Image (spheres, rainbow, N blue to C red):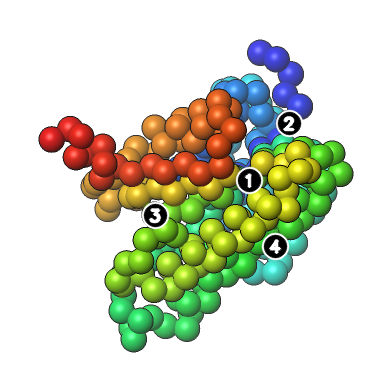
Amino acid sequence: MSQKKRFALITGSGRGLGRELAIVFARNGYDIILHGRNKKDLATTKTEIDKEGAVCDLCAADLSTDSGLRKIYRMIRFREIAVFVNNAGAHCPHLGLEEITDGQIDEMITTNLTAPIKLSREIYRQFLKKSAGALININSVCGLEARGLRTIYAASKWGLRGFSESLRLEAAEKGIRIIDVYPTRIRTKPVFREGMSPKAVAQKIFNFFRNTDSSRLMLDERKSAKKQK
């Protein structure tokens, strides 16, 4: 296997889609920085990455805290990041606005929007120095469509979309690529009995990143289901 020289930082990569993304990037020539809050999950993912022969560093940190962000900043300071996959996110509680607590609002806005912006800023500074790099934002169909019982979640995802599309205008002439991925339901939890396979979604995202120059990827299992009928 060829020597690895490029790091891909993937947040929320202890399990689910993040884990599968880490594996597919490692399989295709990238060293990996895993991030998550659960050390056991990260260790399990690292075992899979080790099988691919890639260097794999772990960063257990809570993105919703300043101390967690500083921990990631320290880790990336002395590593050359080629790709940042912003995958970590707080899930939607599917509650009416009147039922959502201050804590849930803070968690969704901080984890889904504020933390990705701050982390992207730090990595973007690296990208500018070498006029190269890719930022992949794992958004949601809720970042494109208005839906009931998702007010705060949608606000965070629409905000991420606005940030990403505006940053693309700045990055266009600097050799930096900004990609937005808008999936519908992915089976990232045992309770999700419907939706797309995390492994299949991860491969589609990597193929899109590697084989196209486009900036927006829609992954909608609802359209696939209609075609099968």
Can the viewer see residue 8? yes
In this figure, which residue is indicated by the disc labeled 2?
Answer: 6
The residue at 33%/44% (across/down) is 220
Please state which amino acid type lies under the numbered disc 3.
Val
In this figure, which residue is indicated by the disc labeled 1?
Answer: 178
Please state which amino acid type lies under the numbered disc 2.
Arg
Residue 65 position, x and y percent, is: 64, 69
Number of the front mark, 3 or 4 = 3
Number of the front mark, 1 or 4 = 1
63 versus 176 height, above or below: below
Disc number for residue 42: none
Please state which amino acid type lies under the numbered disc 1.
Ile
Residue 211 position, x and y percent, is: 55, 25
* Disc 2 to disc 1, C-alpha distance: 17 Å
Residue 148 position, x and y percent, is: 30, 71
157 versus 82 height, above or below: below
Disc 3 and disc 1 in contact, CB within 8 angstroms:
no
Disc 2 and disc 1 in contact, CB within 8 angstroms:
no
Give the crowd class for mark 1: few <14, some 14-19, many >=20 residues within 10 Å.
many
- Residue 70: quadrant of the picture: bottom right
In this figure, which residue is indicated by the disc labeled 3?
Answer: 141
Can the viewer see residue 23? no
Viewer-closest of 78 and 168? 168
191 versus 43 height, above or below: below
